[in-house]
């Protein structure tokens, strides 16, 4: 290559003499991005094509990476985020610049809040024009906007740095507490050309991106002694425990210790909800009366009333918390025994200490939980068995409870207000990482993105149970489900509105702010794209329709007619919805 004549301009683009070009193999930014992703085991990308990443998507497909194209970037981002949760590898979302980037940013921020590893890769405008604000196509300083909303953000300007940029993004997404990462790829980067051999050498395979973090022996001793002294211990399992995939260690600890456990919604199924030690149906009693609480991958945020207040009763509480992030400790209340480390390592260390001196909890405590659980289950049973027309939420969910019981390996996606709140307690889960829902922020619109990724990543059948309002945020993705022929069954609890379909406009001018078109037929929307649409009015019809759809594996949408008056304002979190008590004088 001694005859090669080359020069480098201010953009760091290598210009090669035509004669030399014929002698050497070249690569470019497009191929280096693809090669970097493939080198690190990325097999699927979720996104929306357009300038400047349309060809990147095509080339990814040609190189064997599966590319799932969505109708909206937020839904593609949600798919990437839950793919990260299910696989422990960063889910990849690919978007265009500016508005497309912003659409994906909500999902990126939600992934970071929920500790899902995800990388949002967006094309962007040219730096020299953006920085001088000269009005480039879709001009925006995307890196600056993304930084406050994710765990890390990087921009790659030179083809030779693509390998490092991708490696840094992957490591940042999955190491420590997982989260969202933004990777900015300006349009000019894709066309940069360099020597193929040098390009291959510039790629980085990330080694041990999420290394084990072993807890300090003294911290383990402290936690064990606190548990040994407890009269009414309780374990709370959060979605972090599900993400850890330390299923055998967690089950061994629960069963060896004999301690009752309470799963948060996305931790349901780590042990079956029907397990004798499950306190799920006695949640209020367990939280109120426990004296020592072990948190495993769960945070004392609003979902657990910040660890204080009437939810937790008057009995003094001592908390043991397992978290990989030291800053999480003492975030709301004092943590008596912090256990900093990855969940698998911490639970393994605790298991090693459950020796012959360990005593299971007092029978009085476990019996109190069992009695309350059985009473609550018996009280709920008649509501679930009603075959009423129109259906209410309980009777409809009773039918779906049986569907999942008969198909425990199916994934359940769930969002809505009443639809979500009641399903959490009614539908039992039997295997880990089978329940996917709105998570920490309680954000609506995750449904179709989560359902698509669940089907793609696991190959399993998916049941998405949606409130009619929640479905509206991502409903156009039913076309995506049909286009890729995914085994997704969608059930829409259609009560004609948000919370209820009975609100009115006092002036009589418009529909009420929470009311939709009465009698909407969402099933026809599915049929428009070649899927199966079914309308049902009773729990028996719902059970039969969902069972048939799940068994067929065909894309199906079932419009379940729910009593418009069923449901409560804001669901179970009405206390968070301010209400005016002042009446305006006329």
Image: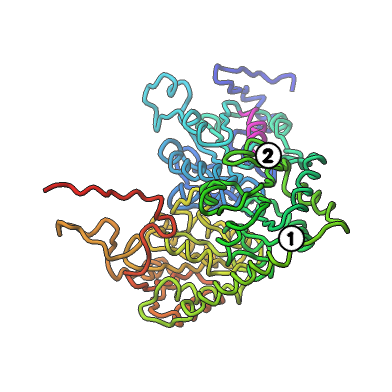
Q: Position of residue 299 (x, y in %)?
A: 60, 46
Image quadrant of residue 486?
A: bottom right
Question: Is residue 138 positioned above or below 441 on the image?
Answer: above
Q: How many numbered dots are placed on residues in this image?
A: 2
> Is 466 covered by the magenta stretch?
no
Is 184 situated left or right of 531 in this image? right
Q: How is the image coloured?
A: rainbow
| N-term-proximal mark, 2 vs 1 | 2
Q: Which residue is nearer to you in this view: 245 or 300? A: 300
Is residue 414 among the parts visible in the rendering? yes
At x 43%, y 22%, the residue is 129
The residue labelled by disc 1 is 254
Is residue 58 among the parts visible in the rendering? no
Which segment is the magenta one?
159-171
Magenta stretch, main secondary structure class? helix
Q: Circle 2: is it few (<14), some (14-19), or many (20+) Cα within 10 Å?
A: some
**SS of the residue under disc 2:** loop
Outermost residue to the left: 586
> Is 163 covered by the magenta stretch?
yes
- Residue 122: mark: none
Q: Position of residue 456 (x, y in %)?
A: 59, 59
Image quadrant of residue 185?
A: top right
Is 101 situated left or right of 375 in this image? left
Q: Circle 1: is it few (<14), some (14-19), or many (20+) Cα within 10 Å?
A: some
**SS of the residue under disc 1:** helix
The residue labelled by disc 2 is 176
At x 61%, y 17%, the residue is 7
Q: Which residue is nearer to you in this view: 113 or 229? A: 229
Mark pair 2, 1: CA separation? 25 Å
Question: Is residue 512 positioned above or below 161 on the image?
Answer: below
Q: Position of residue 244 (x, y in %)?
A: 69, 51
């Amino acid at each position: 290559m001694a005859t090669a004549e080359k020069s480098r301009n201010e953009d760091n683009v290598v210009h090669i003499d035509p004669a030399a070009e014929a002698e050497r193999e070249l690569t470019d930014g497009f191929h280096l991005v693809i090669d970097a992703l493939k080198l690190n085991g990325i097999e699927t990308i979720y996104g929306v094509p357009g300038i400047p990443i349309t060809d990147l998507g095509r080339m990814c497909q040609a190189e064997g990476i599966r590319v799932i194209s969505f109708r909206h970037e937020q839904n593609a981002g949600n798919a990437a985020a839950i793919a990260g949760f299910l696989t422990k590898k960063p889910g990849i979302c690919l978007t265009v610049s500016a508005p497309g980037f912003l659409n994906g940013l909500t999902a990126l921020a939600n992934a970071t809040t929920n500790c899902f590893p995800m990388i949002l890769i967006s094309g962007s405008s040219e730096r020299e024009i953006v920085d001088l604000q000269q009005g480039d196509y879709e001009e925006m300083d995307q890196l600056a906007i993304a930084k406050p909303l994710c765990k890390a953000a990087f921009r790659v300007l030179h083809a030779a740095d693509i390998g490092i940029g991708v490696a840094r993004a992957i490591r940042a997404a999955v190491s420590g507490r997982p989260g969202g990462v933004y990777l900015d790829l300006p349009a000019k980067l894709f066309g940069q050309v360099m020597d193929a051999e040098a390009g291959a050498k510039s790629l980085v395979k990330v080694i041990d991106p999420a290394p084990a973090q072993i807890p300090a022996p003294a911290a383990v001793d402290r936690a064990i002694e606190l548990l040994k002294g407890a009269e009414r211990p309780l374990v709370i399992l959060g979605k972090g425990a599900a993400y850890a995939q330390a299923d055998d260690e967690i089950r061994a600890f629960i069963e060896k210790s004999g301690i009752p456990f309470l799963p948060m919604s996305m931790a349901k199924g780590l042990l079956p909800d029907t397990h004798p030690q499950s306190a799920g149906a006695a949640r209020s009693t367990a939280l109120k009366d426990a004296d020592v609480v072990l948190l495993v991958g769960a945070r004392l945020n609003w979902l657990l009333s910040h660890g204080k207040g009437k939810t937790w009763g008057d009995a003094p509480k001592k908390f043991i918390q397992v978290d990989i992030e030291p800053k999480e400790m003492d975030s709301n209340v004092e943590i008596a025994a912090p256990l900093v480390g990855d969940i698998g390592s911490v639970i393994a260390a605790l298991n090693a200490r459950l020796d012959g001196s360990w005593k299971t909890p007092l029978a009085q405590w476990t019996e109190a939980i069992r009695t309350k659980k059985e009473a609550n289950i018996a009280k709920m049973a008649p509501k679930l068995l009603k075959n009423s027309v129109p259906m209410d939420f309980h009777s409809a969910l009773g039918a779906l409870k049986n569907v999942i019981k008969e198909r425990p390996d199916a994934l359940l996606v769930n969002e809505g207000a009443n639809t979500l709140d009641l399903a959490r307690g009614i539908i039992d889960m039997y295997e880990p990482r089978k329940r996917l829902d709105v998570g920490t922020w309680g954000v609506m619109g995750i449904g179709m993105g989560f359902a698509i990724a669940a089907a793609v990543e696991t190959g399993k059948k998916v049941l998405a149970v949606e409130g009619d309002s929640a479905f509206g945020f991502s409903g156009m993705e039913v076309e995506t489900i049909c286009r890729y022929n995914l085994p997704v069954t969608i059930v829409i609890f259609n009560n004609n509105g948000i919370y209820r379909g009975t609100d009115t406009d006092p002036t009589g001018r418009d529909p009420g702010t929470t009311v939709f078109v009465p009698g909407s037929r969402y099933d026809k929307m599915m049929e428009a794209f070649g899927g199966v649409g079914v309308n049902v009015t009773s729990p028996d019809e719902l059970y039969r329709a969902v069972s048939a759809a799940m068994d067929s594996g065909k894309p199906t949408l079932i419009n379940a007619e729910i009593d418009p008056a069923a449901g409560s304002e804001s669901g179970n979190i009405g206390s968070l919805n301010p209400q005016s008590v002042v009446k305006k004088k006329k």
